[in-house]
Amino acid sequence: MATQGSDERAAGATGRRALLGAGLLGAGGAVLGFGGSARAAEAHTGGGLKSLPKPTIIGHRGASGYRPEHTFGSYQLALDMGADIVEAGDLVPTKDGHLVCRHEPEIGSTTDVADHPEFAGRKTTKSLDGVATTGWFTEDFTLAELKTLRAIERIPANRPHNTLYNGRWEIPTFEEVLTWQDEQTRKRGKQVWIYPETKHPTYFRKLGLGVEERVAKVLHKHGKDRRDSPVILQSFEPTGVQRLNTLVDNPLVVLLSSADSRPWDFVESGDPRTTADLITPKGLREIAGYAQGIGPTLDLVVPRTADGSLDAPSTLVRDAHKVGLILHPYSMRNENPFLPTEYRKGSAPDAYGDAFGAFQTYFATGIDGLFTDNTDTALLARAAFVNG
């Protein structure tokens, strides 16, 4: 998932909507390894979206608190820990039109490309959604070239232990993720869910590399473009989600950054609205016309004060549920810099704060699930919340 919010800076629509709302709002909270939860027994007895417990635990870029993000090592660990859904794929295209899984099209911070002298001449500066960005970009590489690279930890100052795994995994393609999903579903005897994101669709469309059409083509090829397919699609660009709504029947989610931000497709088209406009009752009703959920930054659910501590919850959960939308906010991380001030312990950038306390506060708002880098912590927190 794109971050685009404060957490990173600190370090057949109606039918689909009804199905998703009924499934998630009515589901229980299954937790692997914990008995005593009446809801847990219900969690995986049905198919489709009803199989997802509430609150749903979504492995953010896999188990990225423990392995370099968007690698099969990270995805696999999230599943092994018990994630209900794995965010397998921030999808960006290659020069030859393949979709690969990277946090951003710029790959200098997530791969060892800088150590490849044969690619030194590819380093450049581009305007990515209005921001001058220097590095190496997926659209300047063929898939075969990208497959010679290996993933590295993106935020080593916060996760020095993850650097142990630098160089172990290559960049996955979306096709490989869908094959992996099927293999894991067979192996585990229950449906594995994924939650890909289309990254910077306006940027790539201007390059002649439309992302939505490529996603739809791959999903159709694998028979996963239906209303009951175990693939939820998300994007920070509302018009991109609208385009997906015409191409596939999957559940769709609009990602929402800080209240004062503007989606880049709005900037490009001259639409003056900000995220604050999208989370009004009117804006949410509009989103509900083509999507089934929203993925707001946690700060839109519980705003922070000037000192970084939590303020009173907003009305976003109530307002979104009123129009039939689910909420999967992002992203909970265990390390101090990413937590609200009152949940930090010390000041070490790689030390854990009181993540359990923060999880409980967010769960109590009535959210339907959340993205987390630390699946194991989230499942323990959910067990306490559901059984409490």
Image: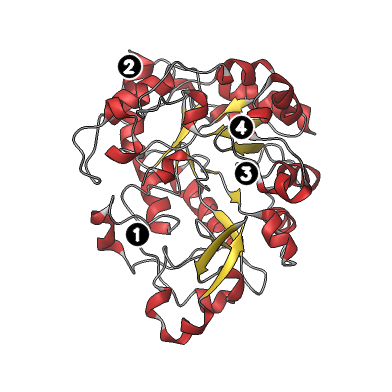
Frontmost of labels 3 and 4 is 3
Q: Residue reaching furthest bottom? A: 118
SS of the residue at dot 4?
A: strand
Q: Earlier in the sequence, mark 1 or mark 2?
A: 2
Q: CA distance from mark 3 to mark 2?
A: 38 Å
- Residue that badge 3 annotates: 236
Give the quarter of the image for residue 200: bottom right
- Residue that badge 1 annotates: 153
Q: Residue at left 25%, top 62%? A: 164
Q: Earlier in the sequence, mark 3 or mark 2?
A: 2
Give the quarter of the image for residue 281: top right
Q: Amino acid at mark 3?
A: Phe
Q: Residues within 10 Å of mark 2 (few under 14, many from 20)?
A: few
Q: Residue at left 43%, top 16%? A: 364
Q: Amino acid at mark 4?
A: Ile
- Residue that badge 4 annotates: 294
Q: CA distance from mark 1 to mark 3?
A: 24 Å
In the rendered structure, find residue 8 and report the number of the disc placed on it. Answer: none
Q: Residues within 10 Å of mark 3 (few under 14, many from 20)?
A: many
* Residue 24 on image: x %, y %: 57, 24
Left or right placement of residue 384 versus residue 318 in this view: left
Q: Residue at left 57%, top 76%? A: 141
Q: Amino acid at mark 1?
A: Glu
In the rendered structure, find residue 36 and report the number of the disc placed on it. Answer: 2
Left or right placement of residue 170 versus residue 122 in this view: left
Q: CA distance from mark 1 to mark 2?
A: 38 Å
SS of the residue at dot 2?
A: loop
